[in-house]
Image (spheres, rainbow, N blue to C red):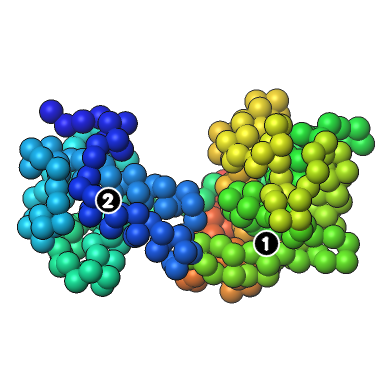
Amino acid sequence: MQPSPTEQDELPLSSALEEFVADWLAHLNAERGYSQLTCEAYGRDLRQFLAFWRGQLGRTPSIADLPLLDTRTFRGFLASRRREKVSNRSLARTLSALRTFFRWLESEAGIKSRAVHSVARPKVPHGVPKPLTVAKALALIDGGMAAELDWITARDTAVLLLLYGSGLRISEALGLKAGEAPTAGRDVLRITGKGGKERIVPVLPITIAAIERYRQLCPYPLDPDGPLFLGAKGGPLSPRIIQLAIARARSALGLPETATPHALRHSFATHLLSAGADLRQIQELLGHASLSTTQIYTEVDRERLLAVYDAAHPRARG
């Protein structure tokens, strides 16, 4: 019987293997620029695999066991996760984490275990982002622009404006330090995104005003080297709080389930494209390493244009 996912994280590893795992995660964070959330997910994926393998071996795996790994073990692990209803998208990330670990292990320690690279990547359906319409995106934000509002609402509005007005990822917005806050005289942000890729992002005047209003209302001192956005108790703001705020707004405004923090970033890109922005410019603003990632928004725009055509063109109506 295989251990549960919760138990898997707690299973012991040999001290040498534990040290390798810790060094690999530190490498991902410090040298590869992976976010803390990505490192946590990769670490969890690797530990779950090692726990599965431990069950197969009947003992704690050691460094000496690593070169003996075969494709059957990796495929068996992915099959066990699939039986637990884990999505193909998550399985693909898990396989990516394992491949990254074993490549690093060979590079850093000369330990060759290449079986994982022969395992086929789970097929991930090609998803097209679901942006909000301009009207719905504005409705989501406008509620926080009232003259009289509490500091929590002012904070949430400032965050949402960074997502929709500047195309930031939620982790990027919540990772801003108070000393980096845009002002009327400094209307750009220097953002370090995925993979340590740095980009310059312009900030709209309405966003600067919203951030300033939040800073004035915030009851806690904002340390220039500390987080710009604080939680109700004065600690760093959790992404989950913004997700819950949007969920409440969805209910109040009758917005679709697709109205999420990341949908605002998608909407930023799609609305710029619809207004005539160049795809390369959007790539730079979003911080995509590859233009092919940005090109998915052309599909969104094409779908929108076809929908307009079907609704308005007399030939389309038959």
Where residue 2 appears, as percent x and y from the top left, is: 16, 31
Where residue 193 appears, as percent x and y from the top left, is: 56, 62
Q: Is residue 14 left or right of residue 237?
A: left
Between 27 and 208, the one lying in front of the other is 27
Where residue 289 appears, as percent x and y from the top left, is: 49, 70
* Mark toward the start of the polypeptide (1 vs 2): 2
Q: Which mark is residue 272?
A: 1
Between 181 and 249, the one lying in front of the other is 181
Identify the residue shown where x is 24% and y is 50%: 15
As measured in the structure, the alpha-carbon distance from the residue carrying label 1 to the one carrying label 2 is: 47 Å
Identify the residue shown where x is 56% and y is 33%: 257
For the residues labelled 1 and 2, say whether their Cβ atoms are less than 8 Å apart. no
Q: Which mark is residue 18?
A: 2
**Numbered disc in front, either 1 or 2:** 2
Where residue 104 appears, as percent x and y from the top left, is: 28, 66
Identify the residue shown where x is 81% and y is 65%: 187
Quadrant of res 59: top left
Q: Secondary structure at mark 1?
A: helix
Disc 1 marks a residue whose amino acid type is Leu
The N terminus: image quadrant: top left
Q: Is residue 167 left or right of residue 55?
A: right
